[in-house]
Amino acid sequence: MTTKDVITLQNYIEMSQGRTGSHSVNEKLVTNKDWILDYKINREQHYVEVTQWNGCEEKIYFQSGEEKEMQEKLDQIQKEQFDKMVEAIDKCVSKSMSDDLNILFLGLAAFLTPASLGLGLFFFGSSFLSLPFKHLKLERNLKLVGWIIDNKKDADSVIHRDVDSKRKTDLSKLTPYIDYSVYPDDAPYSEEMYNNGINLNNIPELSTKQLQKLKKKTISFQERKNNCGEE
């Protein structure tokens, strides 16, 4: 898995900057230095280590038995921050695209003389198609991540099903049973994601293609569930 195939919060910014895209987005305009970049929960010592966008780390302690509530709170905060970032990025990139298209049309008007009409139309067509490509890719990836998080409950069900299908079945007993004591080495998702569900903190573990596959499976799962409910 290559770095550019992985979706992380940093990638959202990089994809819209000159490094990996054709449109400039000011990171300070679409993020907040105090936002949660990622977190790690220490369940044995009852604290969560939060890394903020500015690189600062903070330990937050909680009472024993409050692990689930702490994670749900952090996931909710990350989702709210993600939605704000998506909205801000969309505004920045849309403005950048509008500016680029205005420049393109002005240049095209001066470029298209009768003698250069054929070449000019070719230039216009190729440029027009390339300008929105980066933006559309960025927008598509952001919507993909948002959809997975919005449909987390069903996506988690698919993750459990896919992992459990890799578990060994003990056939030595009169009543065969699935061995849940060992996490399968060839599981398509991490044990952390299996146990705690998919969220913005662990979603970088999956590539864009893996997320697309998970979405497709989740939609199929939802359709089957709805059909069963109608019967």
Image (spheres, grey):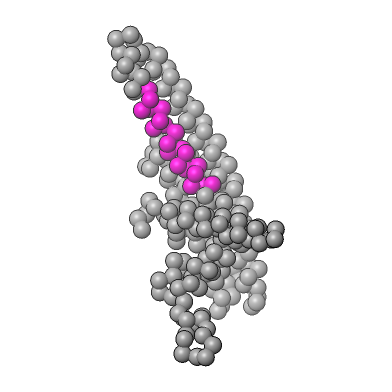
* Residue at x 60%, y 66% (from the top left corner): 71
**Chief secondary structure of the magenta span?**
helix
* Residue at x 47%, y 30% (from the top left corner): 97
- Magenta span has 27? no
Residue 129 location (% of width, % of height) = 40, 30
Quarter holding the N terminus is bottom left
* Residue at x 44%, y 27% (from the top left corner): 100
* Residue at x 47%, y 39% (from the top left corner): 136
Relative to 119, residue 64 above or below: below
Quarter holding the C terminus is bottom right
Q: Confirm whether residue 212 shows in the render.
A: yes
Relative depth, front residue between 169 and 122: 169
Q: Kindly indicate the quadrant of the structure image that contains residue 210.
A: bottom left
Relative to 192, residue 85 above or below: above
Residue range (magenta): 124-143
Relative depth, front residue between 195 and 162: 162
Horizontal side of 120 relative to 136 (left or right) equals left
Residue 223 location (% of width, % of height) = 60, 56
Horizontal side of 83 relative to 93 (left or right) equals right
